[in-house]
Image (cartoon, helix red, strand yellow):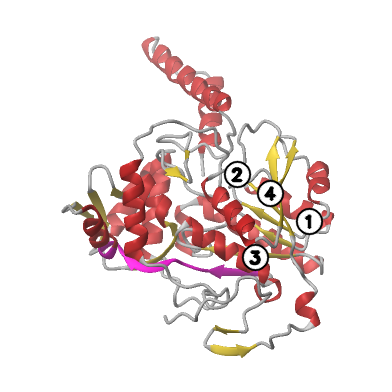
Amino acid sequence: MQQTKESNSKDPIPTSYKYSGILHQIHSSPAPSLLAMSIVKVTLVGATGDLGASMLDAFVAEGTFKVTVLQRASSKSKPAHPDKINIVTISDGLPLDELTEKLRGQDAVVVCYRAKDASEQIKFGEAAVAAGVKRLIPADFGSCDSNGERERELVKLFDRKVQIRESLQRLAAENDGFSWTSLVNGHFFDWGLRADFLHFNLKTKKAEIIDNGNQKSSQATLAQIAKATVRILQRPEVTKNRMLFIQSFCVSQNEVLQSLENATGAKWETVRYDSEDFIREKKALADKGDLDAIEDLVFVLGAINGNWEEKPDFAMDLLGLENEDLDKVVQKVVDEDDEDGDDGYDDEESDASLRRKKPRLNGQHDVREAVKVEDIQDLERIKAYLNDALLFINKIGIARRAEKPPSSADGKARSDFINGCEH
């Protein structure tokens, strides 16, 4: 799809934009109604996670926003650009009345982390309305279209995203001054390569390809997602109450493989999977609580059903965005991976991304490996979850040796651990 030339990002709306096949001409002096929803004061939630850090960089670099970072009181993370932002803390439980007060006076709220259930995200919408916030961008940032029937059937995360969106639709219908925008961007491409989420292993140079590898899917870098979010708030009228789709490029696995081979100067080993067999196997494991299998389902759904270019709400032109160069992005990731020999950990807040390994993004490390802990802010809480898991495993062993089942309390320990780690 041919992209229009990138517009001045500081304009409230582009001079012209093409949307759904119709060319709309906008006067260079926006109508008063378009200026009525000016977005200046923006609160970011989860601004020290992988996506959140890129968001913070983008909003600060723009230079036209007054940025506040909202952090839980227990967080030890330190946001970037401390001299250019306002940092506000809130009780860990995010009490609705306290959250409302923290958001009062803000024009927009961007949530960059995903809670383990829908109720916490829904709370942001309720607090935003009570505080008089004009726009909320929830933690959608989807690898997949969560409205898809199969997506919702296979991964319950997408059901939660729909619940959040339906709540925002209701709030917007009931409150004229409030609006929302959801952004769907496909797989986080640069993050996904570093984390092995995309099944291209930079260390072993092994690729796992779905079907014939020719299916194209929309994917986006963290920087592109952040830029799109900034553009949404610079074009408030044309983006309000909509679910928008963007990308850095729409490419096949085979194209990514070729780019990786060029960048690394090596021939990669490939293993190919039938998509339906892959889904059946991973769904069976996911139903048993296998967290990696849940991520694999998200991966395959994004790979085989993630082409946004024909979507009616494909918003590249609307937001004045252009595709990035696949080879340049891949080369940058490969070069940075070669330079990164540090296995250190950082104390990071969670964000909207799917965590799996220890990728290094923006000079920071993920504190989690192999499992995802979506609502954990510091190492002490991670240790508590791991201790619960070890206690449960030990009691299972003791119970089996005694030929009796574990107690219901032990079952609760396992349930609490899984619930704390799920998407």
Residue at numbered disc 4: 84
Residue at numbered disc 3: 181
Q: Is residue 173 above or below residue 387?
A: below
Please state which of residues 206 and 327 is positioned toward the viewer in this rendering: 327
Tag in front: 2 or 1: 2
First in residue order: circle 2 vs circle 3: 2
Tag in front: 2 or 3: 2
Q: In the displayed orientation, state which residue is furthest to the front.
A: 83
Residue at numbered disc 1: 106
Question: Where residue 417 appears, x then y in whole percent?
Answer: 52, 30
Within 10 Å of disc 4 (Cα), the crowding (few <14, some 14-19, many 20+) is few
First in residue order: circle 3 vs circle 1: 1
Q: Amino acid at mark 2?
A: Ala
Q: Amino acid at mark 3?
A: Thr
Q: Residue at x 43, y 58 (%)?
A: 187
Q: Secondary structure at mark 2?
A: loop
Q: Residue at x 34, y 53 (%)?
A: 279
First in residue order: circle 2 vs circle 1: 2
Q: Is residue 185 above or below residue 2?
A: above
Q: Amino acid at mark 4?
A: Lys
User: Label 3 near label 2: C-beta < 8 Å?
Assistant: no
Question: Where residue 294 appears, x then y in whole percent?
Answer: 42, 46
Q: Which mark is residue 80?
A: 2
